Each structure stands twice: as C-alpha cells, then as structure tokens.
Amino acid sequence: MQHGDFGLGTFENQDGEMVVLDGRVYRIQGNGTVSEAPADATAPFAVVTTFSPEVDLEITPAETLKDLHARCDAYRPSNNIFYAFRLDGRFHDVRTRAVSPPKGSHDRLVDIAQVQAEFEFHEIEGTLVSLWSPGFSNAFSIPGYHFHFLSADRRHVGHLLECSTGTLRLRREKLTDFHLALPENEMFLKADLSKNASDELAYAEEAHRKSSNPAKEKIMDVQPETQPKNGAEVVVQTLESRGVEYVFGIPGDKIDAVFNARYRGSDDPNCRRDSSGLEESA
C-alpha cells in the first residue's frame, strides 16, 4: 500500500468494487464473491490516503442516504477541498452494487451499470469508506460523496446505493494535498478525452441509487414499454395521470401527434374538422 491505507476504487476491466480499509484491499465481484485482492492487482481508478482523522464523534441515525449526506455535511466546512470519511456502526438496511467485467474491452461505465449486481443486507454491522470530491474535480473523480460499504465480518462489500443507519461513529480528515497519477499505456495516450464524460458518470451513479429504494424516493413507476418516446406522449401521460379521460380539439399539424398518442390511431368522436359543435360536445 504505497499510497495509503484507506480508500476506494475499482479493478482492471471493471472487475468488481474496491474498498481499502486498515491497509487491506477488498474486492467484491459481480457474482457476490468477496476476497482480499492480490498484491499485483491493478486498478484503473482508485482514491486512497493515509487516514489520519481530525474529527472523531458520534452522529445520530439516518433514515436514508440523503440524510447521511446531511449528517456528514455538518463536518465538511468547505466545498473546495477533498475529504475522507469513515463511518462505523450498525446499519438497519444497506443496498449495494457490484459491477461485472464488461463483455467488450471498451464498454462505457454507463452501459456496464445497466447489468450490475445489487445486494441487500439488513441489521448488519459495518463500515462506510467515503471520499468527498469538489465539483472542479469532475474530470478525474466523482464530485460529491462516493461511499463503499464493508461489513464487519468482511463478507459483504459494495458501492453504496441506499441505507438506513443506527448511531454511527464518524471520523473525518481534510485532504488538501492531491497527487494524480495517469497511465502511460498506448490505449490511454491515444484515447479521445476531449468529451465531457461527467454527465454519463453521474447517470451511472444516480440512476440506480434512485431506483434502489422506491419506497423512499418519489419517482414515476413506469415500465420500459410505456415510457414516453416524445413530447406528445409526455403530454398524454401527464393528462392521464391527472385523470383526464376526454380531449376536445381540432386536428392539425401542430396537435396531431398528441391525438395520435392519446388514441393510438382509433377514431375519436370528440375530434372535429372545424370549431362548430365543440361546445356542445364538451
């Protein structure tokens, strides 16, 4: 552990999630297998530090991951430096993910995340390892909180999607000395890095976090085959969600898409070729 004893990351070819705790490196693969990584394991992304916290205290229980963020925010006085957080204690519910090796050598994280394995644990002792990164670091890190979970028995590891906790011990260190090491292989040196991948990274991180706990997130439960494909279908779904059963109007270029989305090509007795009779129909 040349660069530190605390941190998180992933392994070569996206082969699992990494947690570095107390100088040991743990890996969980997509099939749920947890092991200590061998000394020669390589990593395309890892953030590590020699952990020396300045803050050590207890925080009150958090019902959701968003609540936990708020608890940590109270001990993060600046948005312009990095922080390392360690939280130990009992977790009532934990939901984590682990990515599997991609089918192709150039698969994007946003695609890999669609087939990730997710795991749920209940009433479990464990540790959260977290690095908080400022917004300006989005080219080489994940802005905001990035949590990985490791159970006390070292049998369960993963990228945290959602949780509820008991009282936790929080330790925090400010990080102002940041060293960035870049690969020197041909693939990296010739890669086109001009595109901003931060939006895709945010999607890969957030999409599954929101879908992981529908009871605690106010999201629309829409099956894939019924998701809106265009603006007209968005209008129709909004009307239907508000209990609208009948729509009166005159067909034409601007509105035909809405009528087509509403009635799927069937005859609509409330469509008129001119404005006469619309009041009586309504």
Image (tube, rainbow, N blue to C red):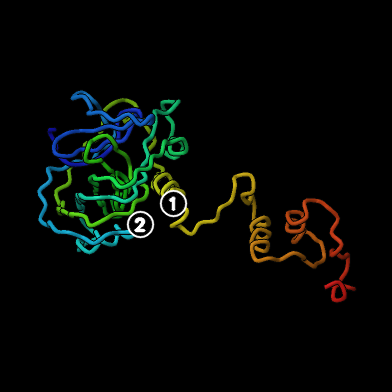
Residue receiving disc 1: 213
Residue 193 lies left or right of residue 25; in this view the side is: right
Residue receiving disc 2: 64
- SS class, disc 2: loop
Residue drawn at (14%, 48%), measured in percent from left and top? 177
Residue type indicated by callout 1: Asn
Q: CA distance from mark 1 to mark 2?
A: 9 Å
The total of numbered circles placed on residues is 2
Residue 111 lies left or right of residue 239; in this view the side is: left
User: In which quarter of the view is residue 190 placed?
Assistant: top left
Quadrant location, the N terminus: top left
Residue drawn at (44%, 40%), measured in percent from left and top? 110
Q: Position of residue 143 (x, y in %)?
A: 31, 51
- Sequence-wise, the earlier of marks 1 and 2 is 2
How crowded pointer 1 is (Cα within 10 Å; few <14, some 14-19, many 20+) is rated as some
Q: Position of residue 193 (x, y in %)?
A: 37, 39
> Disc 1, disc 2: CB below 8 Å?
yes
